[in-house]
Amino acid sequence: MSNEIPQLSESSTPQEIMKAGLASAQGPVKLACSFSVEDIVIIDMAKELGLPIGIFALDTGRLNEETYEVADAIVERYRLQIDWYFPRHEAVQQLEREKGLFSFRESLANRHECCHIRKVEPLGRALQGLAGWITGLRREQSVTRTSLAPIERDELNNGVLKINPLLEWSEQQVWDYAKEKRLPVNRLHSHGYPSIGCAPCTRAVAPGEHPRAGRWWWENPEQKECGLHKR
């Protein structure tokens, strides 16, 4: 693994960021796919460029049916393999037996506990052996993402390279690309869901609301991360 983060200009394209990230990683790199429109755009770009990028997904056990439909459509269209990671069933059983099915709505600590069991711990297993991982994060998505860099070290995960190719893209740019390429996207997007996570933690947003307003809507904006991208 290279110790140097490549220098990129503000005008670097997502394709250039991915190429630079893979060159710097000097080892296996995978996309962490939540089947958001951003992730589908990245898959399409990587396939067009012929980049050797694998794909993994975290099945929390509480995803929407529509999310699985997109996963199936992606596999069929691109003939790729998705490596699925699930939470430890013993941890889920203990959580639900002791605190019920909706403990995450009772406090921020409870919500972080649920996210850790269902997302953060499986992510750690998914990243084992990787030199880098790719995300669909964009700067304008949230106040928690304004300080991200296109390529950075993920110090919470043993310094693995973290590549954010769409960081500077706007929502409009993402959707323009998806529509031009006729990409398969989650049909919940057309029902007021700009951001989609676990089913009980995601709702549709009203016109004019922030795109992330439907994620953990009972919490303050600066708290709306699951721990995968904690800084």
Image (spheres, helix red, strand yellow):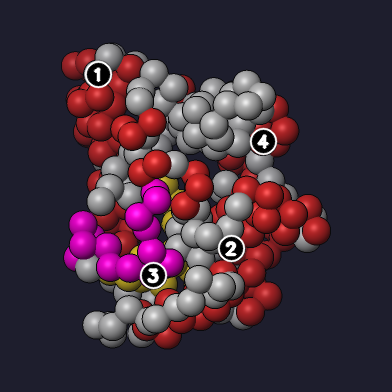
Q: Are marks 4 and 1 in contact (CB under 8 Å)?
A: no
- The residue identified by callout 3 is 151
Residue for point 54% across, 31% down: 210
* Whole-percent x, y for residue 144 in the image: 36, 44
Label 2: few (<14), some (14–19) or many (≥20) C-alpha neighbours in 10 Å: many
User: What's the residue type where badge 3 is placed?
Assistant: Ile
Mark 2 and mark 3 lie on one chain; the one further toward the N terminus is: 2
Q: Which residues are magenta?
A: 145-158
Q: As rendered, which of 224 and 183 lies closer to the eye?
A: 224
User: What's the residue type where badge 4 is placed?
Assistant: His
Q: Is residue 153 above or below residue 107?
A: below
Q: Nearer the viewer, mark 2 or mark 3?
A: 3
* Whole-percent x, y for residue 193 in the image: 61, 31
Task: Label 4, secondary structure: give it.
Answer: helix
Mark 1 and mark 3 lie on one chain; the one further toward the N terminus is: 1
Mark 3 and mark 4 lie on one chain; the one further toward the N terminus is: 3
* Whole-percent x, y for residue 191 in the image: 70, 27
Q: Quadrant of the N terminus?
A: bottom left
Q: Nearer the viewer, mark 1 or mark 3?
A: 3
- The residue identified by callout 4 is 189
- The residue identified by callout 1 is 107
- The residue identified by callout 2 is 42
Residue for point 23% across, 31% down: 113
- In the image, taking residue 99 as reference, residue 101 lies left or right, namely right
Residue 66, picture quadrant: top right
Give yes or no for residue 156 being in the magenta stretch: yes
Gap in Å between the C-alphas at discs 1 and 3?
Answer: 33 Å
User: What's the residue type where badge 1 is placed?
Assistant: Ser
Mark 4 and mark 1 lie on one chain; the one further toward the N terminus is: 1
Q: Are marks 1 and 3 in contact (CB under 8 Å)?
A: no
